[in-house]
Amino acid sequence: MGHRRRFSAFVAKDCNFAPVIRQSLQFARDFLASHDFQPRLQVKLAIVVEELVTNALCHGGKGQDFSLSLELAEHNGSITLRMEDNGIAFNPLCVPPVKAPNPTTGGGIGLAIIHAWATDTSYQRGDVTNSLGLTLA
């Protein structure tokens, strides 16, 4: 497998997590800058990273100290992503697809986008961690 990069973050209980979302996007941009990926794949990675990190922080990390890590690697022009966090158990691969965004919040389609774009997906729950892997091509 090609070049790998890793990012880790910690958010104390009930603290603002917006900086971690920005830092994770910057991590993805830095990774992309070190490779020659097609523009479409670059956009996919940015959207997937933002969706996964935002969902993990908003839904999995409420009311607790929260840590997450992202690992990105290049392999034959594709990007593999692994995200681990200590949030509540949640397998995003088992969520049924939505037909439209939530009319009140506008949310709900991020996981549908990930389902549409990701291949070679995997999820495991350890004792206290979620581990999600996927490939974007």
Image (cartoon, rainbow, N blue to C red):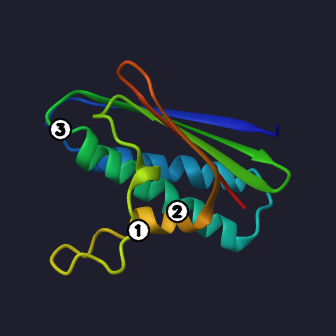
Name the residue rendered at 86%, 51% in the picture: 76
The residue identified by callout 2 is: 115
Look at the numbered discs 3 and 1 and tell me whether their residues touch, using CB distance below 8 Å.
Answer: no
Relative placement, left or right, of 113 versus 96 is right
**Circle 1: element type:** loop
Coordinates of residue 58 in the picture (x, y in percent):
24, 49
- The residue nearer to you, when weighing 59 against 43, is 59
Callout 3 secondary element: loop
Which residue does the image show at 78% across and 39% down from the upper left? 3
For the residues bearing labels 2 and 1, Cβ distance under 8 angstroms: yes
**Dot 1 amino acid type:** Pro
Residue 21: x percent and y percent? 38, 50
* Residue that badge 3 annotates: 15
Q: Quadrant of the N terminus?
A: top right
Residue 51 appears at what percent x and percent y? 41, 58
Q: Mark 1 — residue?
A: 97
| Foreground tag (2 vs 1) | 1
Amino acid type of the residue tagged 2 in the rendering: His
Quick one: label 3 or label 1, which is nearer the N terminus? 3
| Mark 3, other Cα within 10 Å: few <14 / some 14–19 / many ≥20 | few
- Between discs 2 and 1, the one toward the N terminus: 1
Quadrant (top left/top right/bottom left/bottom right) for the C terminus: bottom right
